[in-house]
Image (cartoon, helix red, strand yellow):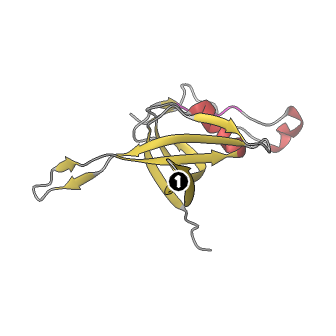
């Protein structure tokens, strides 16, 4: 069986995230995100280029979870797809791209955090779930 791949982006949350609800009651997460760009020079050093900014959206339960866990300045990695959208601005139509994320997480290379490994199932289902072995200290990932 082949490896399944998807589009992914990495960056930082550049604005305060917004959680809104559609008329149908579906949650929508929105934030602008930035991506830093660098150019490698002949001597091996890197020159920082202009940061680009883009739209990030999520929907449904994933959007609610993202709104609880992310704040302006957080580094993240997300997978999903790029979608082109059109909207009206100053009397004209503007075409824009947005990244529609289905999953998002903090960037382990740039973020320090603890992982909660406590069981998430009801006691009714406890016999079918074995939690990971207990650790003497919380797991820390990143810097």
The foreground one among 68 and 17 is: 17
Residue span colored magenta: 114-118
Can you name the residue that lies furthest to the front here? Answer: 91
Q: Is residue 116 a member of the stretch shown in magenta? A: yes
Magenta portion: prevailing SS class: loop
The foreground one among 15 and 86 is: 86
Q: Is residue 102 left or right of residue 111?
A: right
Q: Residue at x 86, y 40 (%)?
A: 125
Q: Is residue 39 left or right of residue 6?
A: left
Instruction: Count numbered badges in the picture.
Output: 1
> Visible in this render: residue 49?
yes
Quick one: quadrant of the C terminus? top left
Quick one: quadrant of the N terminus? bottom right
> Visible in this render: residue 132?
no
Q: Residue at x 47, y 34 (%)?
A: 15
- Give percent across and percent down for residue 135: 58, 30
Quadrant of res 129: top right
Classify mark 1: residues with Cα within 10 Å, few (<14), some (14-19) or many (20+): some
- Give percent across and percent down for residue 73: 43, 32
Q: Is residue 140 left or right of residue 101?
A: left
The residue that mark 1 highlights is 98
Can you name the residue that lies furthest to the left here? Answer: 43
At mark 1, the secondary structure is: strand
- Give percent across and percent down for residue 4: 58, 67
Q: Is residue 52 a member of the stretch shown in magenta? A: no
Q: Residue at x 54, y 42 (%)?
A: 105
The foreground one among 57 and 104 is: 57
Can you name the residue that lies furthest to the right here? Answer: 124
């Amino acid at each position: 069986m082949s490896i399944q791949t998807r589009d992914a982006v990495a960056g930082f949350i550049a604005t305060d995230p917004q959680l809104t609800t559609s008329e149908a009651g579906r949650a929508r997460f929105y934030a602008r995100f930035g991506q830093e760009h660098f150019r490698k020079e002949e001597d091996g050093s890197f020159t920082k280029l202009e940061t680009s900014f883009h739209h990030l959206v999520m929907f449904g339960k994933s959007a609610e979870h993202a709104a609880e866990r992310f704040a302006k300045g957080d580094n993240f990695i997300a997978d999903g797809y790029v979608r082109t959208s059109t909207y009206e601005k100053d009397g004209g139509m503007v075409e824009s791209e947005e990244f529609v994320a289905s999953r998002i997480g903090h960037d382990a290379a740039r973020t320090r955090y603890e992982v909660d490994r406590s069981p998430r199932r009801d006691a009714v289902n406890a016999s079918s779930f074995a939690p990971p072995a207990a650790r003497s200290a919380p797991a820390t990932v990143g810097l």
